Amino acid sequence: KHSSINILFKVQNEFKQFFAGLLVFFTASNSNLHAQSSGAVEGYVEDATGAVIPNAEVSIIDENLGVERTVVSNETGLFRVGELPAGTYLVTVISEGFQAWSTTGLLIRSNETRTLYPQLEVGEVTTSI
């Protein structure tokens, strides 16, 4: 009886190890697939003289899904939005005292980071590029 119980415990432990290994494998595979299917947009917001514009609001909208992400440029004018699904995007930048800047049809591919250099003009009128 002891040998059959020992065999049963051994088989159970081997199954547990096997399924734990499968779980780790599929979790890692899913994580890699997600990382490989996303891209990013980054850039520096400046005015017409090249001076950086901190605290500019940058909105990135997936043109197919309508999903929007918004970030704010830092003290050097830098912004970055990562983990964007591959697709086509509308990017809009606004800051008080400046005309809005936007671009449509920005293609983001997997594992790609697109860099933009939006230059905002003084004023209050919306401008599309």
Image: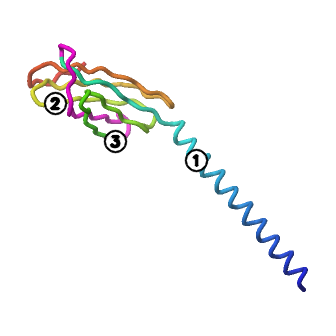
| Dot in front, 2 or 3 | 2
Q: Tell me the quarter of the picture where residue 1 sits.
A: bottom right
| Dot in front, 3 or 1 | 1
Q: Amino acid at mark 1?
A: Asn
Residue 126, percent across and down? 15, 25
> What secondary structure is found at the residue carrying circle 3?
loop
For residue 116, which numbered disc appears in the image? Answer: none
Mark 3 neighbour class, 10 Å CA radius: few under 14, some 14 to 19, many 20 or more: few
Name the residue tied to disc 1: 30
Q: Residue at x 26, y 32 (%)?
A: 73
> What secondary structure is found at the residue carrying circle 2?
loop
Q: Main secondary structure of the magenta part?
A: loop
For residue 95, which numbered disc appears in the image? Answer: 2
Give the Cα distance between marks 2 and 3: 22 Å
Q: Amino acid at mark 3?
A: Val
Q: Quadrant of the C terminus?
A: top left
Q: Among all residues in the image, which is located at the extreme front?
A: 75
Q: Residue at x 20, y 19 (%)?
A: 51
> What secondary structure is found at the residue carrying circle 1?
helix
Residue 78, percent across and down? 30, 28
Q: Tell me the quarter of the picture where residue 2 sits.
A: bottom right
Name the residue tied to disc 3: 67
Q: Which residues are magenta?
A: 48-68
In the picture, measured across the screen, residue 85 lies left or right of residue 117, that is right
Mark 1 neighbour class, 10 Å CA radius: few under 14, some 14 to 19, many 20 or more: few
Q: Earlier in the sequence, mark 2 or mark 1?
A: 1
Residue 19, percent across and down? 70, 61
Taking depth in this image into account, of 105 and 39 the one nearest to the observer is 39
Give the Cα distance between marks 3 and 1: 22 Å
Is residue 103 in the magenta section?
no
Q: Earlier in the sequence, mark 2 or mark 3?
A: 3
Taking depth in this image into account, of 76 and 34 the one nearest to the observer is 76
